[in-house]
Amino acid sequence: MKLLLPHLSGLVVEEVRDTETGLRITARSASEQACCPGCGAGSARVHDRYRRRIADLAVGGRAATIALSVRRFRCQTSGCPRRTFAEQVEGLTFRYGRRSLLQRGLLEAVALALAGRAGSRLAEHLHCRAGANTLLNLIRTLPDPPLQRAPRVLGVDDFALKRGHVYATVLIDIEARRPIDVLPDRTAETLADWLRKHPGAEIVCRDRASAYAEAVRTAAPDAVQVADRFHLWKNLAETVEKCVIAHRACLKNPDDQAQIPAPAPEPQVQLPDGRRASTTRERFATVKELYGKGVGIGRIAELLGLDRKTVRKYAHAPAVEELLVPSRQGGRALTPWVGYLNQRWNDGCTDSGLLFREIQTLGYRGSNRSVRRWLEPLRSSPAPAPRLPTTLTVRQATGWLTRHPDALTSDEALQLKHLLARCPELATAAERVRDFALMMKNLDGEHLPEWIEQTEATNLPPLRNFARHLRQDLDAVTAGLTLRWNSGPVEGHVNLEVTWNLSGVIMSPRCNHGLGRRLERREVADG
């Protein structure tokens, strides 16, 4: 017994029986007395007996159950608040437990490794049946591992518990790629207090948030701050998009002078009047006034009792008429089918009803009237239907400028070459992007000051602003473009399905910085 089942060596085994559900071991404690958990005094005065059913580890591939006869003793200490207490077998039982300590430890290891549903499937094969929620509850009851010092390479990032309202901070051990703590907010004071209590961080990988930078400078001045390369490239792509928008006129191919026939003008729309329209005008004026004074959209929403999206719509609308009269969608709804209509017209099909039914089968959801309006200029003109201009979109041009040249198709590369030939400003932006990408790929951060000087000398205001902001965080950006460390593991925990035990709640961070938008009982990744 001591060799094969050492955790049962303190019991007197009365019977071992093979049943349909597995082995049933009937046993009782061999000790003559037990210690009171309240005062610690021993007692041999038995008050009552009852039987416990303890699930144990499988024996020989069969589930094992221990039918344990348990005694309840009377505590003989006069000042002890406990009148009676039940005995516990060391190494086998614990209070209110229906599993042995060995089986509980096995299930905890399974839960930490595989989480709920996968762990439940493995436990079934181990003859230790446990549901997914049971395994998650075991993880919740585990004590947090003691953390005296911060990891050598620390990753910091924020995530949304409630997007737009409540944010928290996740801390990651970059070398081990494991979460180590979650802070209740994303302020500099909270992170600085944590760093003071857990010294030892030599490298801190972060995004470009000023709060985290200030916290590290205050509480860990000797740590090397590393700006995340992902955020640097994301900020550069947003800057390139602003440059493309500023030179939108260059996106149109000058060789293609064919103009799309304009649809018939819309009749004059009478603006609505009434209580709802007057409320819209009052809210529009109030929002515009507050927004013009620099009040944030969230604060305006609180003051007026409106939703943030509603306030944003009022703040960004150029005129109140756009809010009173919805824009007509007919012409834009027909745009994807203009090429097909022109081709069919040139093929000799001039029946608007037939063309309407044809594009309906292709997915058109507009009206027949829009089709007739489109065909009216073609009926009065003897020339064939014009070919649609091949105008690039801002998104296409931005994507081509920020993608690796090898990732472009031959047609995309040719169109990009023509675009850069007719727009020197975008050609300059492409050169700056290419140099930055090479510097990031080769980890040549020492060339960053030179890149910033050359970029500040360009005539592209968005790029100049981007370079100026890099200069404000020059040391961290240089480290991010030089060292091999980055916030990739942090972003992985933020954007993938990660859970963390915070105040006894399994928190499920969601993608796109939406961590914890819903508190769910989901799979636990990495414990």
Image (tube, rainbow, N blue to C red):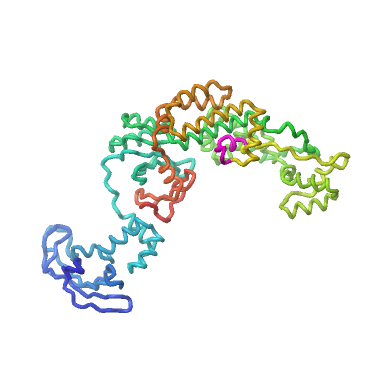
Residue 399 falls within the magenta-colored stretch:
yes
Q: Horizontal placement of 113 versus 285: left or right?
A: left
Q: Horizontal placement of 408 versus 40: left or right?
A: right
Q: Main secondary structure of the magenta part?
A: helix
User: Is 295 in front, or is 446?
Assistant: 446
* Residue 392, image x, y percentages: 67, 37
* Residue 477, image x, y percentages: 43, 30
Q: Name the residue at 55% across, 41% down.
A: 307
Vertical placement of 31 versus 361: above or below?
below
User: Is 292 in front, or is 120?
Assistant: 120
Vertical placement of 229 versus 107: above or below?
above
Q: Horizontal placement of 19 versus 278: left or right?
A: left
Residue 398 falls within the magenta-colored stretch:
yes
Q: Name the residue at 74% across, 49% down.
A: 366
User: Is 379 in front, or is 510?
Assistant: 379
- In the picture, residue 225 is in which quadrant? top left
Q: Name the residue at 48% across, 43% down.
A: 163
* Residue 479, image x, y percentages: 40, 31
Range covered by the magenta-colored residues:
397-407
* Residue 57, image x, y percentages: 28, 67
- In the picture, residue 271 is in which quadrant? top right
Identify the image quadrant of the N terminus. Answer: bottom left
Count up the numbered dots: 0
